[in-house]
């Protein structure tokens, strides 16, 4: 049996919920499909110490500010509670355990799930970046006797007390997991394969996102050049820590490289103190010994792969590969794509914060859908 509606929202994370709230206000019928059993499922799984990197004043979803009692940078659990409240406030009722297998078009949109099919005039894909863990493999990895887990499986340092832990990757998850381990006295190192940009979460007590907003009118490369000295004073000499700075600046990294710079919340200080060691990229495993790109070898009891995710969109939309880039990310978000009735929300990286950008896109998508129904 096939269920029919006006709009199908795929995903009940922040982006899906935001689009749902806008459509609810516009009285547009829709169904929301979620493969997990709760809203914001990935946020339920994130590591315990996680806090938002953007302030609550610039991170709320449409029509619903955060409670005044929340701190400037809310915890993972507080954000989970906010999403649950958001769902109740706008009477959003996702259909859970609906893992979307394929989305296709034959004059109307067809969405196939493991629990049945749905048809609609429009589809909003809002499953986010963190759908499929990226799990690289290295020569000899099968000989490693300890645990190798993805960052999505990491909760806190308790399971690693007394271990020697290698964190692979120096994005925000890798840097924070290494910090979490160090704060609990776990001996750890972080393997950094390439060049990095590092920025502070705040500068002179002002959230870094405020500076990004102020610099938006400027070309990114110009803005990066203007802030070079300020960033250097804020984070220090990265080369002294065994890190190599990227050739571009953080704003250019986001705009052109579509990557987020590492936002430091204490990791650099732990590297300076020697609590976190910096190593080159992993080359191979030999039992419990890891060999790095510079030839150095060290023994570890566990490895945490902070190696990111893929969107899984290529498998979900096999007929529309031209809409995705080489990393399976939509080329355009926040408006109707080249395919009539198909929208993406929540995939456009922004130097001013993902949640802020999600709100902007959700409002644009919801209003566009509502206006098309009245034509």
Image: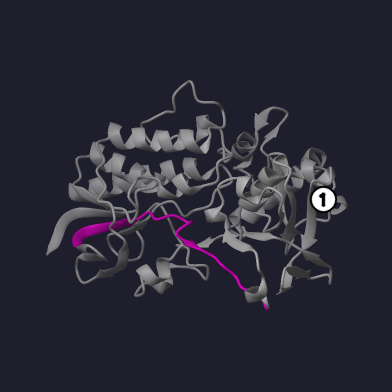
Q: In this view of the protein, can residue 194 be seen by the observer?
A: yes
Q: Quadrant of residue 149?
A: bottom right
Q: Quadrant of residue 279?
A: bottom right
**Residue found 62% across the figure and 40% down from its top:** 212
Is residue 131 highlighted in magenta? yes
Question: Where does the image place residue 367, in percent across and percent down from the top left?
Answer: 30, 44
Q: In this view of the protein, can residue 244 be seen by the observer?
A: no
Q: Is residue 171 or residue 5 the one in the foreground?
A: 171
Badge 1: residue crowd in 10 Å (few <14, some 14–19, many ≥20)? some
Pick out the residue farthest to the bottom. 139
Question: Where does the image place residue 158, in percent across and percent down from the top left?
Answer: 62, 45
Q: Mark 1 — residue? A: 238
* Above or below for 175 versus 77: below
**Residue found 53% across the figure and 35% down from its top:** 75
In the displayed structure, does residue 280 sit left or right of residue 12?
right
Q: Is residue 364 or residue 28 the one in the foreground?
A: 28
Element type where label 1 sits in the image: helix
Pick out the residue farthest to the top. 69
Pick out the residue farthest to the right. 240
**Residue found 44% across the figure and 51% down from its top:** 346
Question: Where does the image place residue 132, in percent across and percent down from the top left?
Answer: 47, 63
Question: Where does the image place residue 324, in percent across and percent down from the top left?
Answer: 45, 68
Is residue 209 highlighted in magenta? no
In the displayed structure, does residue 302 sit left or right of residue 299?
left
Q: Magenta segment, which residues?
A: 117-139
**Residue found 60% across the figure and 70% down from its top:** 136
Task: Specify the quadrant that holds the N terminus.
Answer: bottom left
């Amino acid at each position: 049996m096939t269920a029919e509606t006006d709009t199908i929202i795929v995903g009940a994370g922040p982006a899906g919920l935001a689009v749902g709230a806008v459509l609810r206000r516009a009285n547009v019928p829709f169904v929301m499909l979620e493969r997990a059993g709760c809203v914001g499922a990935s946020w339920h799984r994130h590591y315990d110490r996680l806090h938002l990197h953007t302030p609550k004043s610039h991170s709320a979803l449409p029509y619903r500010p955060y409670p005044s009692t929340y701190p400037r940078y809310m915890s993972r659990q507080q954000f989970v509670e906010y999403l649950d409240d958001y769902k109740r406030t706008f009477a959003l009722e996702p259909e859970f355990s609906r893992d979307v297998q394929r989305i296709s078009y034959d004059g109307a949109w067809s969405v196939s799930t493991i629990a049945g099919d749905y048809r609609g005039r429009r589809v909003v894909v809002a499953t986010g970046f963190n759908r499929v863990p990226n799990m690289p493999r290295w020569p000899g990895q099968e000989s490693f006797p300890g645990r190798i887990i993805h960052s999505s499986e990491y909760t806190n340092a308790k399971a690693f007390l007394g271990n020697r832990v290698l964190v692979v990757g120096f994005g925000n998850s890798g840097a924070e997991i290494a910090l979490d381990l160090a704060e609990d006295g776990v001996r750890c190192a972080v393997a950094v394969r390439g060049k990095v940009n590092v920025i502070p979460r705040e500068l002179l007590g002002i959230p870094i996102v405020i500076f990004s907003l102020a610099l938006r009118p400027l070309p990114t490369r110009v803005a990066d050049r203007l802030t070079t000295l300020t960033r250097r004073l804020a984070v220090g000499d990265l080369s002294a820590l065994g890190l190599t700075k990227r050739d571009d600046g953080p704003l250019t990294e986001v705009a052109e490289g579509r990557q987020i710079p590492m936002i430091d919340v204490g990791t650099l200080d732990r590297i300076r103190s020697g609590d976190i060691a910096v190593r080159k990229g992993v080359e191979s495993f030999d039992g419990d010994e890891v060999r790095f790109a510079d030839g150095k070898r060290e023994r570890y009891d566990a490895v945490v792969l902070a190696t990111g995710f893929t969107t899984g969109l290529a498998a979900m939309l096999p007929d529309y590969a031209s809409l995705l880039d080489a990393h399976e990310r939509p080329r355009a978000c926040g408006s109707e794509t080249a395919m009539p009735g198909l929208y993406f929300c929540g995939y456009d990286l922004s130097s001013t914060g993902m949640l802020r950008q999600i709100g902007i896109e959700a409002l644009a998508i919801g209003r566009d859908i509502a206006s098309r129904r009245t034509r």
